[in-house]
Image (cartoon, grey):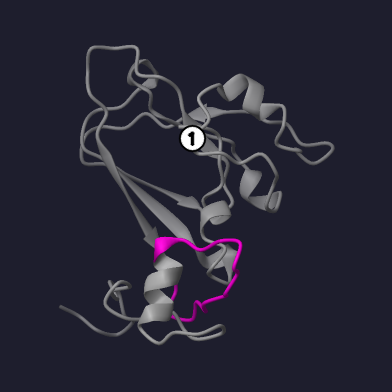
Amino acid sequence: MGWHQDYTYWKCFQNPETLLTAWVAYDDVDEENGCMMMVPGSNQWGLLNGSDFYEQNLDNQKNGMNVPEGQVFRTMPIVMKAGQVSFHHSLTIHGSGPNISDRVRRSSALHLMTGETRFRYDERHQYLSTKQFMASGGKDGDIVQGDMYPVIYKKGVTA
């Protein structure tokens, strides 16, 4: 998984500062089986060019990301046990290396946003979520809501 910032793929939502990803490990993950790597502090750099989830050559890609002057592209492995969850900001640069072990690396990524997040139409970024939101009557500037965006926490409400 190439170096990327999740917000690159979420441009149909305003408020990148409030978007998070919860990455759930189904198997133990370490550098040998391609654990996620993050660039600490990169969420403060803004949206960079060169973000590509599908790129396989992490070293070459790193050089094209336009890291702000004075900042260092330093990576940190996110080693986790099965069942653990890692949270990261939508502007955090992250990726993973190849799995060179004989173990699998299964996971899920859940994308989280606040209840105040608004839809932003951008014809250049017509992702499935954009099309589904618009098909349900949503338009530019509307609060993001509906069956595709379940509420998982509401202050003051207990289960």
In the image, residue 85 sits, relative to residue 55, either above or below, namely below
Label 1, secondary structure: give it.
loop
Identified by mark 1, the residue type is Tyr
Q: Can residue 90 be seen in this view?
A: no
Q: What stretch is highlighted in magenta?
A: 113-128
In the image, residue 113 sits, relative to residue 94, either above or below, namely below
Residue 97 figure quarter: top left
How many marks on residues? Answer: 1
In the image, residue 32 sits, relative to residue 133, either above or below, namely above
Q: Where is residue 73 in the image (x, y as percent from the top left)?
A: 68, 31
The residue shown at (55%, 21%) is 57
Q: Position of residue 140 (x, y in %)?
A: 56, 83
Q: Is residue 138 left or right of residue 38?
A: left
Magenta span: chief secondary structure: loop
Q: Where is residue 22 in the image (x, y as percent from the top left)?
A: 36, 52
Mark 1, residues whose alpha carbon is within 10 Å: few (<14), some, or many (≥20)? few
The residue shown at (58%, 64%) is 16
The residue shown at (76%, 38%) is 66
Q: Name the residue under label 1.
A: 54
The residue shown at (59%, 64%) is 17
Viewer-closest of 156 and 35: 35
Viewer-closest of 146 and 43: 146
Q: Where is residue 125 in the image (x, y as percent from the top left)?
A: 56, 61
| Magenta stretch holds residue 148 | no
Q: Which residue lies furthest to the right in this view?
A: 69
On-image quarter of the N terminus: top left
Q: Can residue 124 be seen in this view?
A: yes
On-image quarter of the C terminus: bottom left
